[in-house]
Image (cartoon, rainbow, N blue to C red):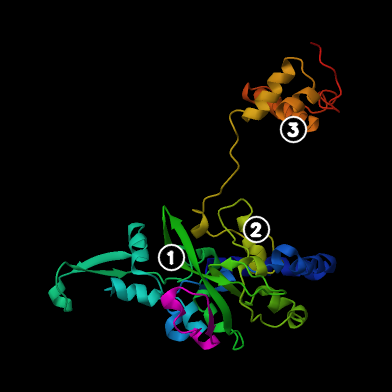
Amino acid sequence: MDAIDIAIANAWNRLSPQLQRDRAEALRRAQRLSATTLRRPVRAWCCCLRASDTRFTDVGEIDPPDALRWRDEHTLRVPAAALRKLCAPVHIPWPGLRWRDAAAKLGFHPETLRAWVERGVFGKRTQFPATVGSRGKPVPFLWRREPIDPAGELGRGPHAAWGSLWLTLHEDIPDGADLHVRRVADWRVHGRERRFNGWRFVCPGVVRPCGRPTDRLYLPIRVWTIHHATVGALARGEAGADTRWACGDCHGVVFHSCSTVRGWNLLISHLTSGLLYGHEVERPYALDDIPVKRRRKRPRPSPRAAMALGMRERGLSYKEIGRAMGIAAGTASHNAYRARRRRKAGEGGEEHDPCEDAKDRGTGEEKSTT
């Protein structure tokens, strides 16, 4: 068990006697699982496939066979057993692999790994060419201590707060989750030249056909949480495992970030299926370095808000301000109110009371004094 599992277990042992006495509160928490936020799968609990993965040619069936050569639209069929290998994390430990061998193992073009090396994803070392049966310049070898997610951003797996579950998530792909999808070429125009920019899946959809081109397909995987151990009746009534590969919009995949203000609460809610809140679980010291993004206050109002306030101070009505700025009278009133409040806060004064200016922010039917 990692630090978060221990913190969740301690919080549940502390709160479970209270929830057993208060059945109404226990039922309310159990019903959180049906909320929209918790019904949507998170990216950390989804298997993912890239449309431009070069390993499809070795494990899949392409119809027509020569479509890759001419960059034509084709149908791709891959069995579930091969998909487990494609979604599995890749390990490239020390002493590493040669540049092209590492790219082939990950399913990327070798030039993609060049950008990864520049961004510090891989460790790089060179070896004398004669020692590896080569000639010419020193031969580069790539390696990495951590496992690599072939479908993750820069090969990184989910945040450490989600634990190591993603390392074995590919083993839970159902036998019936075969991939049968169309692929189309993505062409980009560079000046007067049209260049091939990889492949795109044509999303088959979940409820109805989707048809939008996407570079990734997802398969949500059901994971075991504390909810299944405490509320077994609800766990048995859940639907079976999903076997449909679709885009993130069709599955409603949540790309959860731990660096937001609500990140910790959403993380604990997903890990406990709504039985616990973030403030009830002690945050481990190992996660204290997670940055928290907060809304930064503007030192001055926006230009349009300042314009509305300046026209108002010159004696124009809100109707005239809205006509001059091309907005509604109510919007002009709101912009002037925000600019006035921002200016008072910047001068060190007290916060503006909206009740004092209720008449000034009213219907905007006042007439100009000029």
Q: Quadrant of the C terminus?
A: top right
Q: Is residue 136 shown above or below 133?
A: above
- Amino acid carrying label 2: it is Asn
Camera-side residue: 49 or 76?
76
Which of the two labelled residues, at mark 1 and mark 3, occupies the earlier sequence position?
1
Numbered disc in front, either 3 or 2: 3
Please give the residue where the numbered disc 2 appears in the rendered image: 265
Q: State the image coordinates of residue 95 (x, y, percent, origin top left).
A: 26, 74
- According to the picture, the residue beneath numbered tag 3 turns out to be 327
Q: Are marks 2 and 1 in contact (CB under 8 Å)?
A: no
Q: Is residue 74 left or right of residue 222?
A: left
Q: Could you tell which of marks 3 and 2 lies nearer the N-terminus?
A: 2
Instruction: Residue lying at the far front in this picture: please name it.
Output: 192
The kind of residue tagged 1 is Phe
The residue located at (49%, 59%) in the rendering is 286
Q: Kindly state the secondary structure of the residue where label 3 is placed.
A: loop
CA distance for labels 1 and 3: 44 Å
What amino acid is at disc 3?
Ile
Tally the marks: 3
Tell me the quarter of the picture where residue 162 sits: bottom right
Residue 31 is one of the magenta-drawn residues:
no
How would you rate the neighbour count of disc 3 (Cα within 10 Å): few for under 14, some for 14-19, many for 20 or more?
Answer: some
Q: Secondary structure at mark 1?
A: strand
Q: Residue 67: within the magenta? A: yes
Circle 1 sits on which residue?
Answer: 196
Residues rendered magenta in the picture: 61-82
